[in-house]
Image (cartoon, rainbow, N blue to C red):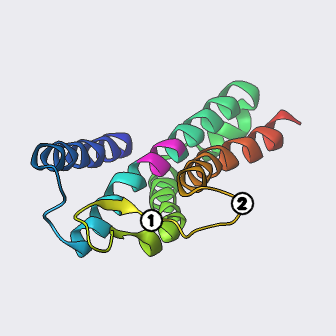
Amino acid sequence: MNLSVANVCMLISIIIFIATEHLGNWPFGNLLCKLYNIQSHIPNITYSLFQLALAVERYLTVGHPVIAGKWSKPLISNYLAGILWIVSFPLMVPVIMYAGTLDGTQLCTVDWPNSSTMRRNTQYILYLVIMDLAFHFQLFLLFAS
């Protein structure tokens, strides 16, 4: 169910993206630009978190069936789903801070601040890679030992 919600959010952002590509600009204003960026980035993070939770659950089921039996309850799954959605929102703080329309243009983007060592696009890609891989790598190290 939660992966479906994340996918629907992604589909809605694709519709808006197609509309802006067709128009050639962003006619919806700065506030909707921020909301669009938040709404299109949260599903990426939550999707990764839910895939990670599924992988951990499968690992526990196969590797430690007694422990998995104690924790595999619908109530715990619902709490975990809520926690994963709540965790994804604070991870969006950089997007919330820097998303918006560029001054003098009708372009909706995440405008990262200038850095003397990295270009803006590099910063954005690095942010996405760290957000997607940091959790996976930490839990991989936890469960691999």
The nearer-to-camera label among 2 and 1 is 2
The disc placed on residue 111 is 1
Answer with the quarter of the image where residue 129 lies: top right
Q: Secondary structure at mark 2?
A: loop
Residue denoted by label 2? 117
The residue located at (30%, 45%) in the rendering is 10
The location of residue 97, given as percent across then percent down, is: 46, 75
Mark found first going from the N terminus, 2 or 1 = 1
Residue 89 placement, left or right of 26 = right
- Locate residue 83, reporting x and y percent: 51, 61
Q: Nearer the viewer, residue 53 or 40?
A: 40
Q: Quadrant of the C terminus?
A: top right
Residue type at mark 2 is Thr
Where's the N terminus, which quadrant?
Answer: top left
Verify CB contact (< 8 Å) between mark 2 and mark 1.
no
**Vertical position of residue 116 compared to residue 21: above or below:** below
For label 2, count other residues whose C-alpha is less than 10 Å away and answer few (under 14), some (14-19) or many (20+): few
Residue name at image x 69 percent, y 65 percent: 116
Task: Give yes or no for residue 50 being in the magenta stretch.
Answer: no
Percent x, y of residue 47: 46, 43
Outermost right residue: 145
Secondary structure of the magenta portion, mostly? helix
Q: What's the magenta region?
A: 44-48
Q: Secondary structure at mark 1?
A: loop
Crowding near the residue tagged with mark 1, few <14, some 14–19, many ≥20 C-alpha atoms within 10 Å: some
Q: Residue at x 27, y 60 (%)?
A: 107
| Residue 102 located left or right of residue 116 | left
